[in-house]
Amino acid sequence: MTTVIYPGTFDPITNGHVDIIQRSAVLFSKVIVAVAKSPSKQPLFNLEQRVELARLSVAHLENVEVIGFEDLLANVVKEKQIHAIIRGVRTTMDFEYELQLAHLNRLLTNGVESLFLPPAEQWSYISSTLVRDIYLHQGDVSQLVPTAVLQALEKRNK
């Protein structure tokens, strides 16, 4: 059984994230979506809300588990006996940053590799940051996020 982890802040989880998760779920026996607390990023949703939104967004995938974490990713990787770390990369800037993290994570986990997946073309321009900016400026994000996220955003406005 090959278990991989897809970590991120997921604030909020987007259709691009779900695409990476779905594609990973086809390739690997088990995918753990690990939602980071990341208080320094001042998230729109708290950790518990982001975990629940991720769970609702991937509920159709039987081999996907969603967890929240506050620890160093390397510690979670060791604890869960992860075989690889999945990272989505959209641009060369993403790749350069992710490459640094991959080297650090390999060192801190005694060799666990990072696998980079490009997004599907229709999601290549989406990021949580852009979705938050559009939302905070009263723009329409309905095509960019799963239904559960859209409902949670609409609820925030009431």
Image: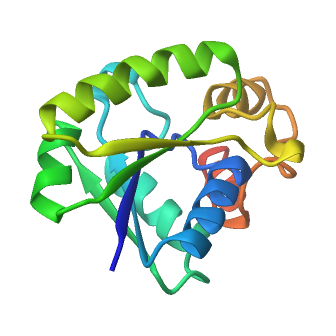
Q: Residue at x 57, y 70 (%)?
A: 27
Position above or below: 31 against 142:
below
Location of residue 22 by image quarter = bottom right
Farthest residue to the front: give it: 111
Total marks placed: 0
Position above or below: 25 against 11:
below
Q: Residue at x 73, y 65 (%)?
A: 147
> In the displayed structure, does residue 72 sit left or right of residue 51?
left
Between 51 and 30, the one nearer to me in the picture:
30
Report x, y in % for residue 93. 62, 12
Between 158 and 17, the one nearer to me in the picture:
17
Position above or below: 95 against 50:
above
Report x, y in % for residue 44. 49, 35
In the rendered image, the quadrant that contains the N terminus is bottom left
> In the displayed structure, does residue 3 sit left or right of residue 10?
left
Report x, y in % for residue 128. 62, 34
